């Protein structure tokens, strides 16, 4: 009945688990630092690896993990570059308009002389 079906099912599962365990023992897979999801865990493992290489034991993990990189210098330079480019474009436009205005003025003077 039901008890025999349950025993049969559990025995089958046990056999499958034992087969998988044997396979895993013969073919171990070692996790790499990149296998761990999440930027905090990857950063924590990277810091631990560097600390082990440098033989450092006492770093405040929480302080290091919560420290954010400062990109302000990059963005300040980018804003400066964009403003400079905009200023140059404006200057070129003003100079172009001035040349056109002078050319029109000279053409108007030539017409006056011809008449």
Image (cartoon, grey):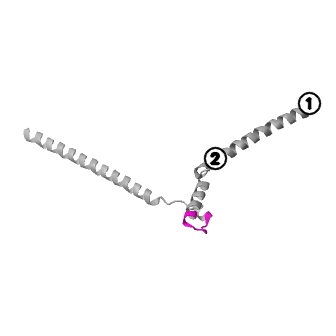
| Separation of residues labelled 2 and 1 (CA atoms) | 41 Å
**Image height check: is 19 above or below 94?**
above
Name the residue tied to disc 1.
Answer: 1
Residue at horizontal 87%, vertical 32%? 5
Q: Quadrant of residue 46?
A: bottom right
Residue at horizontal 83%, vertical 37%? 11
Q: Quadrant of residue 44?
A: bottom right
Residue 13 rendering spot, x and y as whole percentages: 79, 38
Lower position in the chain sequence, tag 2 or tag 1: 1
| Quadrant that contains the N terminus | top right
> In this image, 58 relative to 81: left or right?
right
Tell me the SS state at disc 2: loop
Q: Give the class, few, some or many, for how many residues have Cα within 10 Å of label 1's Cα (few <14, many ≥20).
A: few
Magenta-colored stretch includes residue 29: no
**Image height check: is 85 above or below 73?**
above
> In this image, 47 relative to 1: left or right?
left
**Image height check: is 35 above or below 53?**
above
Residue reaching furthest left? 114
The residue stretch that appears in magenta: 52-61
Residue at horizontal 28%, vertical 51%? 91
> From the viewer's perspective, is the residue at label 2 or at label 1 nearer?
2
Q: Quadrant of residue 105?
A: top left
Name the foreground residue: 101 vs 48. Answer: 48
Circle on res. 29? 2
Tell me the SS state at disc 1: loop
């Amino acid at each position: 009945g039901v008890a025999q079906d349950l025993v049969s099912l559990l025995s089958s599962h046990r056999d499958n688990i034992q087969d998988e365990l044997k396979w895993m023992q013969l073919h171990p897979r070692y996790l790499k630092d990149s296998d761990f999801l999440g930027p905090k865990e990857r950063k924590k493992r990277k810091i631990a690896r560097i600390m082990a290489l440098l033989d450092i034991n006492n770093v405040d993990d929480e302080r290091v993990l919560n420290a954010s990189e400062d990109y302000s210098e990059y963005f300040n330079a980018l804003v400066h570059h964009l403003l400079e480019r905009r200023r140059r474009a404006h200057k070129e436009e003003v100079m172009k308009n001035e040349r056109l205005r002078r050319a029109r003025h000279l053409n108007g003077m030539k017409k006056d002389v011809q008449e």
